[in-house]
Image (cartoon, rainbow, N blue to C red):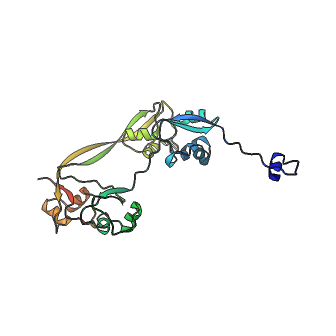
Amino acid sequence: MAVLHILNDPKTYGFNLPPVDKGIETEVVTIDKQVHLKTMAKYLGLSFNVLKGLNPELRRYSTPDKPYAFKIPIGKGAILLAKLNEIPVWRPPIPSYVTHKVRKGESLSVIARRYRTSVRSIMALNRLKNSRYIKTGWRLKIPSRKKYSSLKKASLPVYRSKEKKKIIKYNVRKGDSLWKIAKRHRTTTKAIQSLNNLDHGSLQIGQTLLIPTYLAAFKKIKTKGYTVSKGDSPYFIAQKHQINLSKFLKLNNLTPRSTIFPGQVLLVRAE
């Protein structure tokens, strides 16, 4: 009771208490693209923690790629709308793993060797407690520094290209961002910024940009799938199909230290 009396009338009892924080008044702005809260905070001159606290339901601290009612401190809504086109789109990082379906007779050590990783890394990524207990048909996430693609037995076209750089002019339109322009012309935001001496990502409607594009002269190479047999080696397969070893390795995303296994499907030159 004594505490309540002090809180209700602190000056009478000789206390000087700080004012109670009544919270931040907010307004809502609809955002229809993915934007990271840290980036938005920089553009608006706000604290990342403030935006995060007002929108706690956001995963990865980013707005979704669909219309979303974003809460922002009152008075900042008009500023956000004015700068929204300047704020770059955020894309979630690509998972650094591939999926592997466990086959009969496989163990974690065999799978780890195949993907040039460790048993411990596979166990951690899949939350496995026992390295000896996996079942046929299970789909495991395999940590990988490279992107592996499944190769089918059907004939697949592979292309070699000699790229020639070409510079074009582009006028910025409403809704454009460096990321969108780079994606549309198959280049990078850094390349555009470097060519146009841009220190930031801000663009103006009607602004003329120089865009580096690449023209490729493609040569089609006919390939087919080859199933690895017991005793095969990359050198033997390359020799058998009259293809240079280094080209064979590059064609299949292999290195000189890669291990191949019976049943694995690799690309070779078609007859």
Q: Is residue 98 above or below residue 50?
A: below
Of 97 and 10, which appears nearest the observer? 10
In the shown orientation, is residue 52 left or right of residue 139?
right
In the shown orientation, is residue 65 left or right of residue 79?
left
In the shown orientation, is residue 206 left or right of residue 104?
right
The x, y position of residue 93, in whole percent, is 43, 50
Q: Residue at x 59, y 44 (%)?
A: 51
The x, y position of residue 40, in whole percent, is 55, 42
Q: Residue furthest left?
A: 271
Of 43 and 116, which appears nearest the observer? 116
Q: Is residue 80 above or below residue 39?
A: above
- Count of marks overlaid on the render: 0
In the shown orientation, is residue 265 left or right of residue 91?
left
Q: Residue at x 55, y 36 (%)?
A: 83
The x, y position of residue 239, in whole percent, is 15, 63
- Quadrant in the picture for residue 123: bottom left
